[in-house]
Image (cartoon, grey):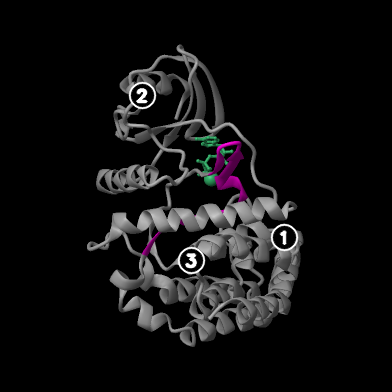
Amino acid sequence: MSESMINPIAERFGIKISRKKKIRGGIYRIVTSKGKTFSLKRMPKRVGRLKWIDRILLRIQRNGSLVAWRNPNTPEGRKPYATSRKGEHYVLTPWISGRKPSPRSLSDMRRCGVALARFHKAGHAGIKGKIAYSRIGSWYSALRHREGYIKHKIVKARRNAFSLSNSRFIKQHGSEILRYSNRAKALLQGSGYYQYRRNPRKFGILCHGDGGPSNFIINSKGTYLIDFETVHVDLRAYDLYRVIYNSCKDYKWNFSIASAILDGYRQVSKLHKNDFKLLRALLRFPYTTYLVLSPFKRLPFTKRRLQWALESERKIGPFLKKLDEYAAKNCS
Ligand SMILES: Nc1ncnc2c1ncn2[C@@H]1O[C@H](COP(=O)(O)OP(=O)(O)O)[C@@H](O)[C@H]1O
Ligand SMILES: [Mg+2]
C-alpha cells in the first residue's frame, strides 16, 4: 500500500488521518484528526470470507472476549471493510495500547492460554450448525505436502544444487529430518484424528490460526487477541500448537513456557488426552527446518539457520516427553 493510497481508504471509513506510521507493508498505525488511534490493515481475503470473519468476531466481542476488532456502534466502526481503487480490502481496528507478552514471563504465558481458551469458548456459538472455512480435514495432507517439499530439497542437495555448505548440511542431516516428519505422520495416525475429521460439526471450533506472542496484547483490561487473517474452523489442538510453537521456538523449547500456556487454557476449559495426542503430532513435524528451506523471508536459507533449526528439532523429542508427563498428570 503506497503512502498516498491510505488517505482515500481512511476516508472511506469516514476518518481523516493526522499522523501515520508504517508497521510493515500493508499495515499502518494511524491517528485520526480527532485523536483516535487505529490499525489500518490490508486483508488479502475474498469478500465472503471477510464478512464471515467480521460476523464471527463481532459475536465473540459481544460474548466478552477481548479482540482488537471494530466497534459497530462508533462512526469509524460502521463498515466491516473498505476497498481501494485497486480492489484490495482493508480493515480498520482500534489500536490496543499495551505490551506484547514475553515467553520469559510465565504469568504472561498463562494469560495467553486463558485468552485463547476464552476465544475458543466465545467463538463456539458463531460456528454452530454450519461449518464454513474448515481446515479440520487437511492436517495429514498438509504434513505430507510439507514433507514432500523437504524431500524435494534433499534430492536437490544431492545434486549439489545449493551452496556447498547448504548442500552438504542437507545431505548429512536429511535422513534425520525425514525421521521426524515420519514420526509426526505416525503420531497423527495414532491420535484419533480420523475420527475427528469425520465429525467437524462436533469437534470444530473457531481457531485464531496464528496465536503467539506477537498476536496478543496485554493491558490493564486484560489480554487481547489481534491479527485475524488466519481465523478458520479447526480442532483446538491446532491453535494450542501455534501458540506453543511461536512461544517456545526462540526459547530453546523450554517446557515451562508450554506448561504455563496449558495451565492458563485449563483454567477456562478442560483439555483431554486426545488434544495432547494431536498437539504432539503437529509439534513433532520439523516445521522450523521446513521454514528455513522454504522461501519464507524471515528465515534465510543459510547453513547457520539450518543448524539452528536442526538443534531446535532435536529439542522437541525431550519436550514431547514432558508434554506426555503433563498430560498424564493433568487430564482425563
Ligand atoms: N490493533 C492493534 N493494536 C495494537 N497493535 C497492533 C494492532 N494491529 C497491529 N499491531 C501491531 O503490529 C504488528 C503487526 O500486525 P499484525 O496484524 O499482527 O500483522 P502480521 O500479519 O504482520 O502479523 C503486531 O504484532 C502488533 O505489534
Ligand atoms: Mg501478527
Q: Dot 1 corresponds to which residue? A: 305
Vertical relation: 246 (above or below) 186: above
Q: Is mark 3 within 8 Å of ligand 2?
A: no
Q: Is mark 2 within 8 Å of ligand 1?
A: no
Q: Dot 2 corresponds to which residue? A: 76
Picture coordinates of residue 168, whole percent (x, y): 74, 72
Q: Dot 3 corresponds to which residue? A: 238
Picture coordinates of residue 114, whole percent (x, y): 55, 55
Give the magenta-colored segment's residue range: 205-223
Within-10-Å neighbours for mark 1: few <14, some 14–19, many 20+? some
Q: Is mark 1 within 8 Å of ligand 1?
A: no
Taking 226 as reference, is 292 left or right? right
Within-10-Å neighbours for mark 2: few <14, some 14–19, many 20+? many
In the rendered image, which quarter is residue 317 located in?
bottom right
Q: Tell us which disc is closer to us: 3 or 1.
A: 3
Point out the image quarter for the N terminus: top left
Q: Which one is nearer the viewer's eye here, 11 or 85?
A: 11
Taking 248 as reference, is 7 left or right? left
